[in-house]
């Protein structure tokens, strides 16, 4: 059954080598006071930081910087950015970095136009009703934040990691694969797992259709082919380019057109692990996903897992049940082959807080009964325990 | 080699049953003087015409109508629309119908802001520098005009059929598959051929990539599976919905990301046939395409045709050359199976004007040397002769 859908992807995506030269024209006439949001030192080492400051100077912009945004960006960093926006009367937000930097920038852009605490916008206490213009330069193939409307913000105090939504869509995003050539193998692999998981969350649903099945499979095949190349040969432009292009479509809506909605169960569960232990999101997903797949394999769902295995791994031999099982096994094997962990114990995580995690999923996301197979509290616990 | 690309698809696509209810909010605050562009009687018979007039009245809009836009819309119809826009000081253009109606509306929207003859904007004598806001309600799965930036306008006087470009992107497009349930089998089939040809023009290029190969194959599989169902069982909502969703992606840029550019040779040649004989675009494409494929099959290109055959028709047996040939044969067979012609002689077309057609392609599109295999004047003539 082809469900109704809205598709709205208004970001202008400028993809390819040297596209940073178009940043100046992109922000021209959008304001002169820029908040420049950045993460660690990689964009300083690569020269991108200086290049952007030069472009902003050429455009006659005054620049305030929110530097040091971390993975799993915390609301305290967002609050700091919002204060700068208010104090400096910032006109637009420009983020350069990975998905965490972009997500923090989005939350800042929304918080700047909200009089209260920006956490209200993440927790859902208040809706996002507007935002400063958002521009991005993406340097990691993973979240797709450069082409979607949301972001993920953590709160260390409350041990929460939640999605801020409300049309936080960049106006222009520059995606130059050369910026990703220096990403280390582990982060490359974790990014690949994140892209794949975005697809899984939309592909493994109760009803799909030929068109979006094919769109999902295109992204999955791209990741499975190119991630091992990029991990083994980090300077391989082609592999990096395919991964970066694929990542942009993860959460923009294209992959779920006409499909039944899913509560994104693996993300729901992994966000708990990240919130408690600060682990790398993609690595957590690589551990959780095969366990979730094993739990979700039933007589009803086997055909879809088998279809996935054929489309992505070329598995064509044996019964539907056999192919479905083999597809799940190959998924775990793929994650291990690119250097990702396969057990929570590798992070030193025990079952100590599983109950609290499951309760928090239920409190913030509901019981995930709309997932591919209904989960509930016991299902969430089973996935976590099976991942130990 | 992943080429650089821009991707910009800012239309808000509202897909599904009953989405027309959202037309009012969509146009609210965008102006009160509406040019309503329509084609033949089908939207009157279906009640859509009255429904839209009711919505516009409820929104307090004054409405002028440009009715009777025909397939292969002529510049004379565009000129008439532009005159209305000037006389009535129209604020926005709303098109309801198939791709021809939408294309005419786009040209009118651009012409309304251009002081000269709107044909200048089609012929390339003057660039499109702005346009009235464009809203669409699409009733035919074919051109994808509801989600792209161009349109095709004919000129009966000069026997030309050319593309108007320049960011003519709808703000909001409503795509309700129920409006397509009454499309007759021949028009359904011709629309399917048009969708497929859009993909072919982007898929059969010198260099592709895993990601956009997969996007293209998703659309092709969707058409090949669903067009026969919709032709045999016109009221089948699922098949209609898949075709309509697939059609929207034909020309929006998604299918060609990172691929080498193509001069769209089948469209270039078919536009000549439509311009001379007024034949249905999709039917012309169904005739031209297999001939163009046969001409384009070489030792270098065989692998891509074989890959296409596997992805779309499941052809897996035999050598690359054998599979490539079989894939082309199956393409022609598919078009015939849904009731489309396979010979120009079926339209009563002879070789009388082939020389003039080839010369006009060369004059307006160049010699198509950038096509999958270079064509030139002799190649164009060979495709035409092989289609007789």
Image (cartoon, coloured by chain):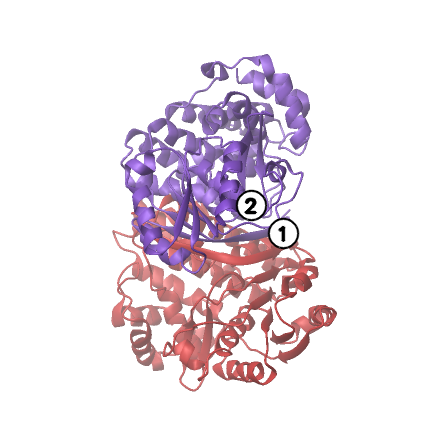
Chain colours: A purple, B red
Residues marked 1 and 2, same chain: no
Q: Is residue A182 above or below residue B200?
A: above
Q: Residue at x 64, y 30 (%)?
A: A373
Q: Residue at x 63, y 74 (%)?
A: B34
Q: Is residue B267 above or below residue B4?
A: below
Looking at the image, which is closer to me, B128 or A152? Answer: A152
- Chain letter for the residue marked with disc 2 in the picture: A
Q: Is residue B176 above or below residue A303?
A: below
**Residue B328 can be seen in this image:** no
The quadrant the C terminus of chain B occupies is bottom left
Residue A259: image location, x then y, percent:
60, 44
Residue B227: image location, x then y, percent:
55, 57
- Dot 2 falls on a residue whose secondary structure is helix
Looking at the image, which is closer to me, A72 or A87? Answer: A87
- The residue indicated by pointer 1 is B238
Looking at the image, which is closer to me, A171 or A208? Answer: A171
Q: Residue at x 53, y 46 (%)?
A: A86
Looking at the image, which is closer to me, B147 or B41? Answer: B147
- Horizontally, residue B336 falls left or right of residue B38, namely left
How many numbered markers are drawn?
2
Residue A34: image location, x then y, percent:
43, 49
Q: Residue at x 56, y 43 (%)?
A: A111
- The residue indicated by pointer 2 is A110
- Chain letter for the residue marked with disc 1 in the picture: B
- Dot 1 falls on a residue whose secondary structure is helix
**Residue B379 can be seen in this image:** yes
Separation of marks 1 and 2 at Cα, in angstroms: 39 Å
């Amino acid at each position: 059954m082809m469900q109704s859908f809205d598709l709205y992807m208004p970001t202008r995506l400028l993809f390819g080598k040297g596209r940073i030269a178009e940043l100046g024209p992109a922000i021209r006439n959008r304001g002169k006071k820029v908040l420049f949001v950045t993460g660690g030192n990689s964009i300083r080492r690569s020269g991108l930081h200086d290049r952007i400051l030069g472009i902003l100077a050429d455009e006659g912009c005054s620049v305030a910087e929110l530097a040091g945004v971390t993975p799993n960006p915390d609301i305290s960093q967002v609050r700091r950015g919002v204060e700068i926006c208010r104090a400096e009367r910032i006109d637009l937000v420009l983020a350069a970095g990975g998905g965490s930097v972009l997500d923090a920038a989005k939350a800042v852009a929304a918080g700047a136009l909200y009089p209260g605490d920006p956490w209200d916008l993440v927790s859902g206490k208040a809706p996002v009703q507007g935002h400063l213009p958002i521009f991005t330069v993406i340097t990691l193939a993973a979240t797709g934040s450069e082409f979607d409307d949301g972001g993920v913000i953590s709160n260390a105090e409350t041990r929460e990691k939640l999605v801020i939504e409300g049309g936080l869509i960049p106006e222009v995003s520059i995606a130059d694969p050369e910026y990703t050539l220096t990403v280390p193998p582990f982060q490359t692999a974790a990014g690949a797992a994140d892209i794949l998981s975005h697809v899984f969350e939309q592909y493994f649903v109760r009803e799909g259709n030929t068109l979006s099945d094919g769109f999902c499979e295109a992204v999955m095949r791209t990741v499975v082919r190119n991630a091992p190349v990029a991990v083994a040969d980090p300077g391989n432009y082609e592999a990096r380019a395919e991964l970066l292009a694929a990542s942009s479509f993860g959460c923009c809506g294209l992959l779920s057109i006409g499909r039944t909605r899913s509560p994104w169960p693996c993300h729901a569960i992994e966000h708990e692990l990240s919130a408690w232990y600060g682990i790398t999101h993609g690595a957590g997903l690589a551990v959780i996903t095969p366990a979730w797949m094993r739990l979700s394999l039933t007589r009803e769902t086997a055909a879809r897992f088998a279809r996935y295995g054929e489309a992505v791994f070329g598995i064509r031999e044996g019964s539907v049940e056999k192919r479905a099982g083999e597809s799940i096994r190959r998924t775990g094997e793929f994650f291990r082959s690119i250097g990702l962990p396969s057990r929570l114990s590798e992070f030193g995580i025990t079952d100590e807080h599983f109950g609290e995690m499951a309760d928090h999923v239920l409190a913030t996301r509901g019981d995930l009964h709309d997932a591919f197979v209904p989960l509930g509290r016991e299902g969430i616990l089973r996935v976590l325990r099976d991942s130990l």
